Amino acid sequence: RCVCALCRARSQLADCYALGIGTELNDARALFQNARAADRGSEIACYAVAQANRFGLLGLDRDPWEASKWYRKMSECGVKNAPQSARDKAAEFLREQSARDTAAEWARAP
């Protein structure tokens, strides 16, 4: 779990790029900054990368499996710094994804 100033700064910089605050919009840079912070264990950055994959934001295609990876990483990092709404959304998505995976396994069973 990372709560260092660098990760917070990367997440804030990512928001600036994503929203065009003080700079031009730049999805690639927003994603890069969030991914760097997420790799270091920032729960909020993990959530941002998960959401980008889940909904096809920041120039990404929708990818529920990649979103699941980042939501799981968020929970592994500890979620004390993530807002309750982010924790709830992550948990809901992972439950839905687990149910879909189980249904797919049952469909493949002989």
Image: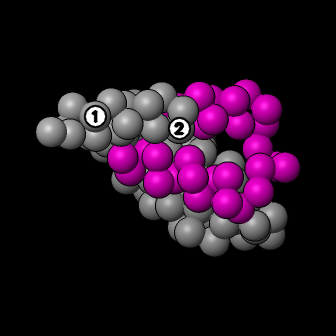
Q: Earlier in the sequence, mark 1 or mark 2?
A: 2
Q: Nearer the viewer, mark 1 or mark 2?
A: 1
Image point 51% across, 53% down: which residue? 70
Of the pair 29 and 69, the residue shown nearer to us: 69
How crowded is the residue under tag 2: few (<14 C-alpha within 10 Å), some, or many (20+)? Answer: some
Image disc number at residue 94: 2
Image point 46% across, 38% down: which residue? 98
Q: Residue furthest right?
A: 80
Image disc number at residue 52: none
Circle 1 residue: 106
Q: Where's residue 23, x and y in %?
A: 52, 46
In the displayed structure, 47 sits above or below 87; it is below
Of the pair 81 and 22, the residue shown nearer to us: 81
Image point 38% across, 50% down: which residue? 66
Q: Residue furthest left?
A: 110
Decide whether the magenta segment is chiefly helix, strand or loop.
Answer: helix
Indicate the amino acid at tag 1. Answer: Trp
Q: Where's residue 60, x and y in %?
A: 31, 43
Q: Does 88 appear in magenta?
A: yes
Quadrant position of the N terminus in the picture: bottom right
In the displayed structure, 107 sits above or below 53; it is above
How crowded is the residue under tag 1: few (<14 C-alpha within 10 Å), some, or many (20+)? Answer: few
Magenta-highlighted residues: 65-93
Quadrant position of the C terminus in the picture: top left
Q: Where's residue 12, x and y in %?
A: 67, 51
| Quadrant hosting residue 73 | bottom right
Tell me the element at label 1: helix
Indicate the amino acid at tag 2. Answer: Leu
Of the pair 101 and 39, the residue shown nearer to us: 101
Whether residue 31 can be seen here: yes
Tell me: 63 left or right of 18. left
Q: Does 91 appear in magenta?
A: yes
